[in-house]
């Protein structure tokens, strides 16, 4: 270590190492802060009826956007019909714990191709998430927050952290015509790309926002049904892989709503 050049090189390498450690610490330390920011915007979506044995029925996750009165979720989370005999209504559950606040919800837009629904709720505005303009790439860090087991133990948002592992077609051509389903045929006519995530979502996570850990900006919507019914329809035992619909399709639906 007597050589001045070696000493300078060693100091430079040490400095770079320390900077990298500081950056890594900052990057990972920022996720808890981001979760704190995202959590108030994540809601439960379900139905409510005072006349049924089970008053509340949890169906999926949603998140708040725009002026704090719009909720995004998957289209398949929304029931096709509500039971009028028991005065069942579509609702959004807000807050944490066993006694969340409940607000009525109305569907204002739905896109069955990309499995996206937009709801509107009354009352005071809630914290809204920002839709990202970031051009995401494979290998980037992601996180998503939702309700993987619904309201069984109360509404306690759960966050999963991973990477965007692949940008892949929503459906792949079947090996034989016998493997083709009606949904696959429809998707082959309108193919698009989805995100495959290296993090496991569960029933109840449908509609969860997928966001950038550093900023909380939403890049996609977790989908546990649509992609499974197309991309993995040929599998006897579908995998536990999680897929998500890119946020651009939500932006397109929002544009259609504004133009009406």
Image (tube, rainbow, N blue to C red):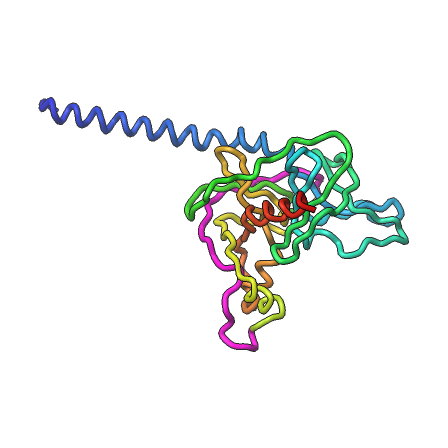
Residue 175, percent across and down?
49, 74
Above/below status of 143 relative to 11: below
Between 236 and 123, the one lying in front of the other is 123
> Residue drawn 43% across and 43% down?
140
Outermost left residue: 3
Left or right side of 138 for 227: right
Residue 195 visible in the picture: yes
> Residue drawn 74% across and 29% down?
124
Above/below status of 197 relative to 13: below
Number of marks drawn:
0
Q: Is residue 176 magenta?
A: yes
Q: Is residue 177 magenta?
A: yes
Outermost front residue: 259
Picture quarter with the N terminus: top left
Above/below status of 98 relative to 229: above
Between 209 and 114, the one lying in front of the other is 114
Left or right side of 181 for 138: left
Residue 204, percent across and down?
65, 49
Above/below status of 171 relative to 104: below
Residue 21 picture quarter:
top left
Left or right side of 249 for 6: left
> Residue drawn 82% across and 47% down?
89
Residue 237 visible in the picture: no
Between 144 and 112, the one lying in front of the other is 112
Residue 112, percent across and down?
66, 57
Residue 174, percent across and down?
51, 71
Q: Which residues are magenta?
A: 151-179
């Amino acid at each position: 270590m007597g050589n001045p050049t070696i000493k300078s090189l060693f100091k430079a390498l040490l400095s770079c190492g320390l900077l990298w450690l500081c950056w890594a610490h900052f990057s990972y330390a920022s996720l808890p802060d981001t979760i704190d920011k995202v959590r108030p915007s994540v809601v439960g979506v379900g139905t409510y009826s005072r006349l049924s044995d089970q008053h509340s029925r949890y169906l999926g996750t949603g998140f708040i956007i725009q002026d704090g009165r719009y909720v995004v979720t998957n289209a398949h989370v929304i029931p096709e019909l509500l039971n009028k005999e028991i005065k069942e209504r579509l609702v959004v559950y807000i807050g944490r714990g066993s006694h969340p606040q409940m607000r009525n919800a109305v569907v204002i837009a739905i896109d069955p191709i990309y499995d996206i629904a937009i709801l509107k709720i009354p009352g005071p505005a809630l914290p809204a998430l920002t839709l990202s303009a970031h051009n995401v790439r494979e290998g980037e860090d992601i996180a998503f927050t939702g309700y993987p087991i619904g309201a069984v133990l109360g509404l306690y948002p759960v966050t999963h952290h991973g990477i965007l592992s692949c940008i892949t077609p929503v459906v792949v051509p079947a090996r034989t015509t016998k493997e083709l389903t009606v949904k696959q045929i429809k998707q082959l006519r309108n193919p698009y790309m989805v995100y495959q995530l290296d993090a496991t979502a569960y029933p109840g996570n449908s509609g969860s926002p997928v966001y950038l850990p550093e900023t909380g900006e939403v890049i996609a919507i977790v989908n546990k049904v649509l992609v499974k019914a197309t991309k993995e329809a040929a599998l006897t035992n579908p995998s536990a892989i999680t897929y998500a619909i890119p946020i651009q399709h939500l932006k397109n639906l929002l544009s259609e709503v504004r133009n009406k």
